[in-house]
Image (cartoon, rainbow, N blue to C red):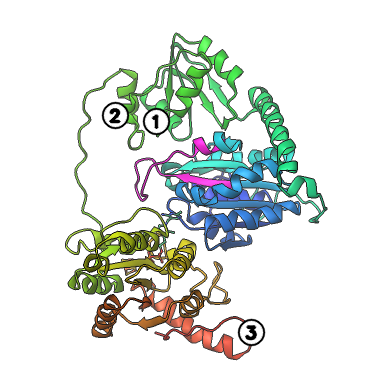
Amino acid sequence: MHASQDSQGRLLLSGNEAIALAAKHCGVHLATGYPGTPSSEILDGFQALGGKAQWAPNEKVAAEVALGAAFAKARVMVTMKHVGLNVASDVLFTMTYSGMQGGYVLVVADDPGMASSQNEQDSRRYAEAAVAPMFEPCDSQEAYDLLKVAFETSERWGIPVLYRITTRVCHSKSAVKPVCSPDQMPKDVYNPSIQFERNIAARVMVPGHAKPAHRRLRAKLAEMEAWNNTQGPHRTEMRSANVGIITAGICYHHAREAAPEASTLRLGMTFPLPMALIKAFVAGVKRCVVLEENDPWLATALRAAGLQVESKNDAIFRFGEMSVDRVRRILRNDDSIEPVPPRGKPPELCAGCPHRSSFEVLKELDCIISGDIGCYTLAALPPLSAMDMMIDMGAGIGMGLGLRHVLPEAEARKVVSVIGDSTFLHSGITGLLEAAYNPPPTGHVVVILDNGTTAMTGQQEHPGTGRKLNSDFTNRVSYEALGRAAGFPNVLTINPIRERDVFKDAVQKSLAKNELTLIIAKSPCILAVSHIVAGEKERKVWESNGISGGVKTEGKVL
Ligand SMILES: Cc1ncc(C[n+]2csc(CCOP(=O)(O)OP(=O)(O)O)c2C)c(N)n1
Ligand code: SF4
């Protein structure tokens, strides 16, 4: 037994830790993804357990790397936050057609209430739109147990499976009894012979192949629904016949606490829905209430199937997380205004954060700042109030270019696009290409805030840090070389703290030119500085040993 297991063999794990352990016990060959709260710890956990885990530059690439591996019969897991699925959706919508020969589970972490996200979109809509089966664990034990069922479903139907978790499931800790100790492997672990077998018609999605693939997909869907009705991972708990609650995910636990006497149908697989099972449950109770966070997706589907169910008042409860108190209110049809929770202290940049200096300068120069997502988005809040827009990862460059194209010249000259290093590599590179391809008449100024890490989501490595998820050294991208290759005539690397005046002068002069300028504001995240500085020293040894073979950075070493 593992040291941290109790006398009954249980471990205290968060949902993310439970998924990492389940991935190990499911024999996952490769886990990949892009960081995003609340999903980020899954890959670190899997790697700590000895699994092969890696960060991709973005979610789409992660999903595609995993697909290639699954074409060779591997078991693969991809992790991301809900908005990451927007980025990966292009591959998702067609890999449900092509299918795969290995097991493919895409873990997507929704953030109802937007604890750390720019929206509270509902990933269940992706399952339906892309025709991908979806599982929704309600706690750490289910997060562990259902992953195996998800892989088996994927392999049985040759289809990618979405594994939807939410903030509370990801981060709450509860007891998990694994099938064996974390340092062992189950006896029945999936162990295929990894190999590539050519099947052009199944994998090259030209119309002639995609048309029959779409029909195959719909047929699979019907089969999966039949299976889900009779063998799906659901739990019907009949208590009082007066009230029944249909739910999934964390809402199940809220329902149990708020209404212990109510009967419950807890769905483990929410797409395709087990409609026959649901109909039988509805028929067995006098009043049936659907409990769900976010969109009224489940309630709408049940009503469309002709079922008379009650649901939350979406004018109130569509926004934010579900809670025990909210469930009580929903059950007693209480639509009164909710008390406003006390306002917490607003987040702020750390003392000594290099982003502070960059934004102070841009503010002093009265720039119009087209921003992006990362720690530096905090510059939008008082006292700096130095970011004018932020929508999605990578958008800062495109939005800045749009402003430059239409604003009167004097205003256009003030526009600067500011983007973090991880965000630039995630989806800013194409914005850089757009700038070079369609340069505005006044040119443009792009500032990459290179703090040597993905700070906002917990200091993950990325292709600009030159280290992999497991901290091994690897190739390191050169922003300077990228800028020049794209066609930027002016490329500068400046430390915005130590060379504040140089930085200010460079921005000022660049704004006055009708040219494209890329400024790399290079200074380490204060929380990661010891890791970065120590890494630079070790890297020199690594490179001098001739192991690199990669592109050496032209930037200053700090
Ligand atoms: C599509 C998408 N994926 C992931 C995230 C989560 N996320 C927000 S900002 C960010 C990266 C921040 O790193 P960086 O750009 O280097 O800025 P820093 O936080 O280091 O200042 C990530 C991964 C997101 N918001 N959207
Ligand atoms: S974690 Fe790093 S990048 Fe983020 S605010 Fe703190 S010092 Fe700045």
Question: Which quadrant of the figure shows ligand 2?
Answer: bottom left
Q: Nearer the viewer, residue 203 or 150?
A: 203
User: Is label 3 in contact with label 2 (beta carbons under 8 Å)?
Assistant: no
The verdict on residue 525 being magenta is no
Residue drawn at (46%, 46%), measured in percent from left and top? Answer: 82
Determine which quarter of the picture holds residue 310.
top left
Residue on which disc 2 sits: 316
Magenta residues (range): 106-127
Alpha carbon separation for disc pair 3 and 1: 54 Å
Q: Identity of the amino acid at label 3? A: Ile
Residue on which disc 1 sits: 254
**Residue 84 pos. (x, y %):** 48, 51
Residue drawn at (55%, 36%), measured in percent from left and top? Answer: 129
Residue drawn at (23%, 64%), measured in percent from left and top? Answer: 386
Determine which quarter of the picture holds residue 159.
top right
Residue on which disc 3 sits: 547
Vertical arrangement, residue 107 with respect to residue 426, above or below: above
